[in-house]
Image (spheres, helix red, strand yellow):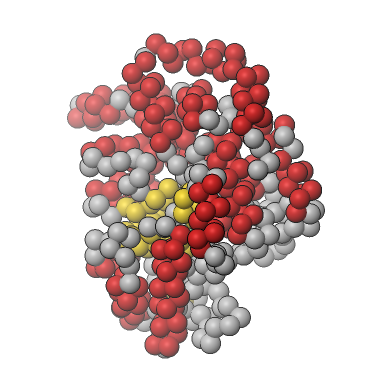
Amino acid sequence: MLLNSDQIAQHNEARLAKHKQQLAPWTGEVDKTEAIIEKLMAYQVAIPSWALGTGGTRFGRFPGGGEPRSLDEKIDDVGLLHALNRSSGAISLHIPWDIPADAAATRERAAALGLTFDAVNSNTFQDQADQPESYKFGSLQHVDAAVRQQAIDHNIEVIRHGVELGSKSLTVWLSDGSCFPGQLNFRQAFQRTYESLQAIYAALPPDWKVFVEYKAFEPNFYSMTVGDWGSSLLYAQKLGPQAYTLVDLGHHLPNANIEQIVSLLLMEGKLGGFHFNDSKYGDDDLTVGSIRPYQLFLIFNELVEGMDARGMNHASDLGWMIDASHNVKDPLEDLLQSVEAIQIAYAQALLIDQARLADARNANDVVTAQEILQDAFRTDVRPLVAEARLRAGGALAPLALFREQAIRQQLIGQRGAKAIATGL
Ligand code: PSV
Ligand code: MN
Ligand code: MN
């Protein structure tokens, strides 16, 4: 491990006085402050194995060096993040990008770093060298039963890997759809996809969930067979109680009201989890909170209110994952920023006095309702997030410590300046 607890302790020691000053205004409302800190400490966000290297775009890839060359090194990187922030205690694998050669050893390596395995992700959007059938015209929707069966078998194989790792959910994202009018009979494509998903659903262990992820566009540009939350919910409802909708923040048409979608999915008991990221235009997969932090906060407001109304456990009843990947930042620094942005939005949402908000709504006092939300959003909760990290054994300023310890340079030293992440 490139970072030890002494280095974290020294870093914290040097920043402690300033941190205490910043925390001082919060100590007046002890109960509220403590409740938020405890919730933050319990809350973990899974890191996607594919975000640990530069993803690039179709116009090029600009790796910064020292990227993980194997699944083991990806686990080590998530271990580093978790040591820094104590909130990245899970990893989400994409198969076949990250197939464990020895599941027991992989699990052990992760456990030694305090990590568990979150949802496993299947991939029927790319053709692999050794597969007989092509996904060019879709996978679970395909007109040819042999292609559908190959995609079903792959998903069942992914579940098998997940079982060996201790995962409890499968995320199915399909690129299936059509690029041109006339290419597809929508109803038949839906039916075939549904039947394929039924076969996958039947292979789920009883304590597993399947997340049906939707996306409005790309790589198909005329229609996507799981294109919006309506179609995802339809599949989830038809499949049964183990099936849920997964919301990826970048998968909506411009200006969609994602917080409303989240609220209604929660109401129906069909919200499975998230792929957090941010975007300006589409599926940009940018750092969480970098473009629309208010939207993120409003989503967390719905989550806190809706989960509390249903008596749900914030930490464990939904899948909290990041789905990001880009070209111009150090991937580890970016993930530290993303996790912090999620925690900030969560803490701000926890500040909202839901009873007062309900009163304002019932009195049709639009101004007060807006003020309550904006007051919480404009509150600087960073001292609470830092305090939660400190108590959990992490660093007061993870990003600063990452740079103080020259971790990327150390990784380049170990892995090489040209090391590029596998998978993707
Ligand atoms: C598709 O755009 C997606 O969001 C799905 O979650 C995939 O599994 C992931 O990206 C792959 O990068
Ligand atoms: Mn996604
Ligand atoms: Mn995406």
**What residue appears at the point 41 percent right and 23 percent down from the top-left corner?**
375
**What residue appears at the point 26 percent right and 37 percent down from the top-left corner?**
308
Q: Is residue 163 left or right of residue 133?
A: left
**Residue 121, percent across and down?**
47, 63
| Res. 81 image quadrant | top right
Q: Is residue 41 left or right of residue 245?
A: right
The reply to whether residue 219 is visible in this rendering is no
**What residue appears at the point 58 percent right and 47 percent down from the top-left corner?**
78
Q: Establish if 183 lies above or below 27.
A: below
Q: Is residue 167 left or right of residue 60?
A: left
Q: Which residue is at the front of the view, 212 or 68?
A: 68
Q: Establish if 134 lies above or below 213.
A: below
Q: Which residue is at the front of the view, 23 or 101?
A: 101
The reply to whether residue 67 is visible in this rendering is yes
Q: Establish if 411 lies above or below 124.
A: above
**Residue 240, percent across and down?**
24, 65
Q: Establish if 212 lies above or below 409.
A: below
**Residue 153, percent across and down?**
42, 78
**What residue appears at the point 37 percent right and 41 percent down from the top-left corner?**
315
Q: Quadrant of the N terminus?
A: top right
**Residue 423, percent across and down?**
62, 65
Number of numbered discs overlaid on the protein picture:
0
